[in-house]
Amino acid sequence: MAEENVSDHYRLSAHAWGKYPYEVRTREQLLPAEIDPTALAQVVRMRQPSRPGRLRGWDFFRICVQDHNLLAAVRRAGTDALFMPLMTYVLTHELVHVVRFYKFQHLFEAGERARQEEESRVHAITAEVLDKVRLPHLDRVINLYSKYGTEDWNSGPVFSSEGMEHADLRVSV
């Protein structure tokens, strides 16, 4: 669902993703350095070694889903109904980053301020991409991110099913 919606937004054909290689891994598949104690996901740039006849290797991006944090947030909410909208938001958000990196709309290596500004931009794009998606609780996930941004909410009040006021929705690059 995330790839299809991002494709529609950026007008990418099905084969265009070959120009934007990425992979998705969960905690079980992640290297220790790719595990984050607070984020729901992060994008890591990888370099494939050069092959015979090529001058250099090629880059691709790895979306590291921090499923332990994602599941903990859903557990704290007390309802499994949040899993799908949260996962949809997170994967869409990370794919927007991937496309923006490949199109050089934002540099992967950026200072902290530029990264924070990019997170705001990517959230706005993600909200636009998901605007037509009809999924229970998705609007709440988007609104939470709009309200709290990239704060580390692990230290604050927990994600509750009543008010859904706080959640650890931090995604990072």
Image (cartoon, rainbow, N blue to C red):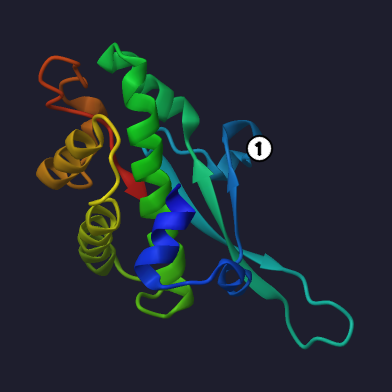
Q: Is residue 173 visible?
A: no
Q: Determine whether 137 is above or below 109 in the image.
A: above
The part of the image, by quadrant, that contains residue 144 is top left
Secondary structure under tag 1 reads: helix
Q: Position of residue 110 (x, y in %)?
A: 35, 71
Q: Which image quadrant is residue 70 in?
A: top left
Q: Which residue is mark 1?
A: 29
**Can I make out residue 132 in this image?**
yes
Nearer to the camera, 81 or 59: 81
Side (left or right) of 10 relative to 17: left
Amino acid type for the residue under numbered disc 1: Gln
Q: Residue at x 60, y 75 (%)?
A: 19
In this rendered view, identify the residue nearer to me: 146 or 112.
Answer: 146
Q: Residue at 21% across / 65% down in the picture? A: 117
Quarter holding the C terminus is bottom left
The answer to which quarter of the image holds residue 123 is bottom left
